[in-house]
Amino acid sequence: MQWWLQEAWLGVEKSESQQCQAIVSLKQARGVPTPYDKRQQDVVGRKVRVCFFDVGDVSGTVAASNIRPMHGNIVGNIHEIPVAWHKSEEDVWNFSKSSTKADDYKFIMRTNAPKDDLFLFIEFIVDLVSDSATELKRQERKQAKPTGVSPSSETIEMTCCWAKVPLVNLLSSTVDIIRLEEPLYGGTILNPVELDEDEISRRRYGWRAIAKALKPYTPPKLSIKSLQIPKLSAQEKLQIAQLPATVVVPYSAVPILQDYMHLMVSVLSNPQSASSVHTCEPALKLFPKILDDHIAYEAFRAVFDSDMRGPFKTPADRVERFGDLVLRMWPAFIVPKPRITDDETKESESKDERAKYLTSMAKGKYGLRDVKDTSVPFHVREVSFQRLI
């Protein structure tokens, strides 16, 4: 046992020396632009996406035409964060667990990529119901479809603004906690545009209106907190050291990812498995989809906390149990979502109803036999993944 602890702690020291890592929390954003009033009623959701972005090409050499090449690359995965919003403060987005009922706002960022040209890219997005986009597609298919088909509405995404934080600003060897106020921009990350005051709707009512009148204009800002890894306990450091080399995930998912990595090791190290099994293992492919869907993730995490407490006779039993829990969520990602038509209400697609459905699924109350139309089995080219160990 002592030998195992020494080896594990060596892994922690290696991780802290080679990885750029911190626990980042989004607190609040002020000055977020909103769609103009006629489209305000079409907004059905808000969210934020976070990822690493490498702008090494942008800061590279200037071409012969004296134009700097405008390219960049997303590094690793993309993490989605739910948002809480209230019409009384329409330019304010909140991310705390007390307001969103989810703790995705607190995530761990970890990468071994060179940090000089690496940014944490934060994109603010609204979901809009677009009749015009659907109508245009319907007109294009008008000759191929019979008349009398009822039009339907499609949900589209619109970027409100964004922020980018140099990775070096989120890391420190001298302080435990870093707090930042980052500006919000329009345009794109490669072509930023400052947000004008008239683009931000800051209507206030009651005492908020009086307070607004007495305060000067404040530029749009995003409040961020970064907690350094050395501040954590030894157990948390051991779990973080076993994560993939580059990842952005909710901090609450660190223990779950530890079991996911054990499952990956068991699949890749099995000499009796065919090579195609390594790329077709359903649980390995399905779990990242669960992690990307915050409603499915919350349902899965609740069952994980109760069902994975153990005790287990062998480590293989724990790995097998984790794979079974992941496969329970299969029907949630293979059944196509119904289109929202004019005859259907938004309540039928509410988050609360979907959360209840996914919670029952995570508890094992549904299976593939409960699904009318299942998809074809996973295909090798569809589910191939990069080896992270």
Image (cartoon, rainbow, N blue to C red):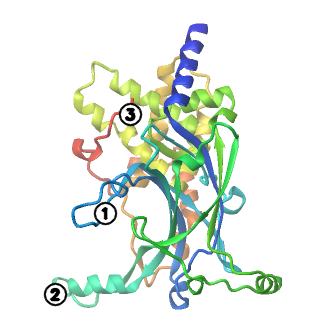
Q: Is residue 156 above or below residue 238?
A: below
Q: Which amino acid, mark 2?
A: Gln
Report the disc number at residue 68: 1
User: Which residue is tagged 2?
Assistant: 143
Depth order, front residue of 351/61: 61
User: Closer to the camera, 16 or 280?
Assistant: 16
State how far apart marks 1 and 2 are (Cα): 46 Å
User: Visible in this render: residue 348?
Assistant: yes
Nearest to the eye among marks 1 and 2: give it. 1
- Residue 110, given in percent of the width and then of the height, sits at 51, 40
Q: Which of marks 3 and 1 is nearer the N terminus?
A: 1
Residue 159's place in the image compared with 15, above or below, is below
Residue plotted at (47% across, 77% down):
128
Q: Residues within 10 Å of mark 2 (few under 14, many from 20)?
A: few
Mark 1 or mark 2: whose residue is earlier in sequence: 1
Q: Which of marks 3 and 2 is in front?
A: 3
The percent position of residue 365, horizontal first and vertical second, equals 52, 47
Tag 3 near tag 1, CB within 8 Å: no
Residue 210 occupies quadrant: bottom right
- Is 111 or 382 nearer to us in this picture? 111
Residue depicted at x 27% and y 19%: 272
Query: Could you say whether the residue bearing mark 3 is in a helix, strand or loop?
Result: loop
Mark before the other along the chain sequence, 3 or 2? 2
Crowding around mark 3 (Cα neighbors within 10 Å: few <14, some 14 to 19, many 20+) is few
Q: In terms of image quadrants, where is residue 66?
A: bottom left
Judging by the rendered image, the residue that carries numbered circle 3 is: 388
Secondary element under disc 1, as helix, strand or loop, is: loop
Q: What residue type is labelled 3?
A: Leu
Can residue 41 be seen at all in this image of the molecule? no
Which label lies toward us, 3 or 1? Answer: 1
- Residue type marked 1: Arg
CA gap between label 3 and label 2 equals 49 Å
